Image (spheres, rainbow, N blue to C red):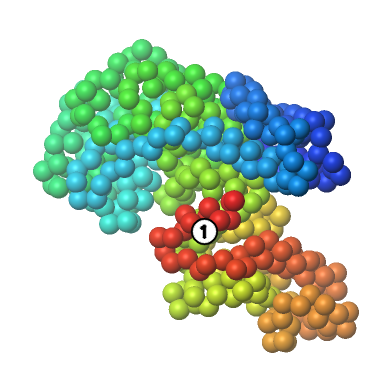
């Protein structure tokens, strides 16, 4: 079960519970069983799922909840908190500081995406003003140095490696020393992988780690690894001091839950996820927004960040002001479509906009979704200003709908579908009403509000 499906199953279970007239023991148990099944199907480790179920039952004591309590909300909050608990080891990872040299060592099995992720990590920091450098200490896999060299050159990141030297420790030490001299503040060491866990790999990792004394060891894990994830992560943790995890290939059809169990195994947080083969298909991982997204609650903080990144500066205050007044008009939807079409890579942005993800743009069907958006926009081009700026759903009567269909050369049922989509989004976005408009840097407060 891919993560989007997992999210869908969990939200459906919560929705079904909400539809019940009375929430009693049976309704709660049905809901929890449904969630348990979904998590297990996604390869989340059995013990974690069982603990989660027990904890929720402990928190939600139906007998003790007074009649006035909103049981549904309390249960939903408990599920949200427990999912966050699985993903949050409770202590943050070491964060490199700009301007101060840090050495970060990457470890993981061959094929996990380690080399690709090293470059993504370097590129991400370079864009934020760091001076990163890459060292290829993978002497095991033929072609590893070439791959790193190619990626590094593309991203204009200095690199170090050797075709001749077979001792990974020697290369790692030389590379780190060289880039320290060159005042690089983020020196990334890519180490060898193996097809499977084996003693030689762990010994080599230990030696490289001892020689380069990394400030942070990042364990890279392929999200498709399934139930084996917990043990694999634990084996790496026992050999080197893993301080953070990066889960790759979250864009694929992997179940994902297994890799997320790695957090529990390494007691280290997931700091980024890889969402594609390209350099910029890399996202910061934050537990709460991730779980919100998983439960279809929308990733508000990610969305707000995106607004600051992609909506032109002069349009931001106006858009946020309108949203905070609860005015999600067709014109705002139109403008958001315009922004989305401009932004790319479309999938990433979409998944962050509350309500825009699963229904409007199913994963892997970006082209169709893009065509759908363009179709909607053509229909909206045939609307009057009054129609675009109104937030009164009753305004769109039959004759207006027919006129729009004629004007845009589309069928009436397509216009109706577009208006239904608008209503759905307006309902979700109405949650923004009354919110304090945040400035950049105040996102987490907003996120907390939305998730509460
Ligand atoms: P390594 O052996 O661990 O260094 O793995 P590589 O970096 O060579 O990656 C193995 C394959 O996975 C390559 O084809 C990468 O392009 C691909 N890959 C890495 N990260 C991702 C990701 O996040 N999504 C997808 N779809 N592919 C990825």
Q: State the residue at coordinates (82%, 30%).
A: 26
Q: Whole-percent x and y of residue 98?
A: 24, 50
Q: Is residue 439 left or right of residue 320?
A: left
Q: Whole-percent x and y of residue 331?
A: 65, 78
Residue occupied by mark 1: 446
Q: State the residue at coordinates (39%, 14%).
A: 198
Q: Residue furthest bottom?
A: 385
- In the displayed structure, 237 sits above or below 338; it is above
Q: Residue furthest right?
A: 398
Q: Is residue 226 left or right of residue 399?
A: left
Q: Whole-percent x and y of residue 314?
A: 45, 78
Which of the pair 364/202 is nearer the observer? 202
Element at label 1:
helix
Q: Is residue 431 left or right of residue 251?
A: right
Q: Whole-percent x and y of residue 347?
A: 57, 55
- In the displayed structure, 423 sits above or below 115; it is below
- In the displayed structure, 396 sits above or below 254; it is below
Q: State the residue at coordinates (44%, 20%).
A: 234
Q: Quadrant of the N terminus?
A: top right
Q: State the residue at coordinates (84%, 73%).
A: 411
Q: Residues within 10 Å of mark 1 (few under 14, many from 20)?
A: some
Which of the pair 354/417 is nearer the observer? 354
Determine if residue 404 is in view.
yes
Quarter holding residue 104: top left
- In the displayed structure, 312 sits above or below 11; it is below
């Amino acid at each position: 079960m891919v993560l989007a499906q997992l999210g869908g199953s969990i939200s459906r279970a919560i929705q079904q519970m909400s539809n019940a007239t009375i929430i009693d023991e049976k309704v709660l148990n049905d809901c929890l069983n449904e969630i348990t099944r979904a998590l297990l199907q996604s390869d989340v480790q059995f013990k974690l799922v069982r603990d989660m179920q027990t904890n929720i039952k402990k928190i939600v004591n139906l007998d003790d909840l007074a009649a006035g309590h909103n049981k549904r909300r309390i249960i939903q909050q408990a599920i949200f908190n427990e999912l966050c608990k699985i993903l949050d080891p409770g202590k943050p990872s070491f964060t490199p500081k700009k301007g101060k040299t840090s050495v970060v060592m990457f470890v993981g099995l061959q094929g996990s995406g380690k080399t690709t992720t090293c470059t993504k990590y370097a590129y991400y920091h370079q864009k934020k003003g760091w001076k990163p450098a890459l060292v290829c200490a993978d002497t095991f896999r033929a072609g590893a140095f070439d791959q790193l060299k190619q990626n590094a050159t593309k991203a204009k990141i200095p690199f170090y490696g050797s075709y001749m030297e077979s001792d990974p420790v020697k290369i790692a030490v030389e590379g780190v020393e060289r880039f320290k001299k060159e005042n690089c503040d983020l020196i990334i060491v890519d180490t060898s992988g193996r097809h499977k866990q084996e003693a030689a790999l762990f010994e080599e990792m230990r030696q490289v780690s001892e020689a380069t004394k990394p400030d942070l060891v990042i364990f890279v894990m392929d999200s498709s690894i399934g139930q084996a994830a917990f043990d694999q992560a634990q084996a790496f943790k026992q050999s080197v001091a893993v301080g953070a995890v990066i889960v790759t290939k979250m864009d694929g059809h992997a179940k994902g839950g297994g890799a997320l169990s790695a957090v529990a195994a390494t007691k280290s947080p997931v700091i980024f996820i890889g969402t594609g083969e390209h350099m910029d298909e890399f996202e910061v991982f934050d537990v709460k927004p991730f779980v919100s997204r998983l439960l279809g609650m929308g990733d508000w903080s990610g969305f707000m960040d995106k607004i600051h990144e992609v909506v032109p500066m002069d349009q931001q205050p106006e858009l946020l002001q309108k949203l905070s007044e609860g005015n999600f008009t067709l014109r705002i939807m139109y403008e958001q479509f315009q922004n989305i079409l401009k932004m790319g890579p479309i999938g990433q942005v979409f998944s962050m906009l509350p309500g825009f993800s699963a229904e409007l743009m199913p994963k892997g069907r970006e082209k169709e979704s893009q065509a759908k958006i363009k179709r909607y926009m053509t229909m909206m081009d045939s609307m009057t200003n009054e129609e675009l700026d109104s937030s009164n759903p009753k305004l769109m009567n039959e004759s207006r709908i027919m006129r729009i269909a004629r004007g845009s050369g589309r069928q009436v049922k397509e216009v109706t579908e577009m208006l239904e989509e608008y209503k759905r989004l307006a309902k979700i976005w109405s949650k923004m009403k009354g919110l304090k408009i945040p400035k950049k840097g105040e996102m987490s407060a907003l996120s907390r509000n939305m998730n509460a």
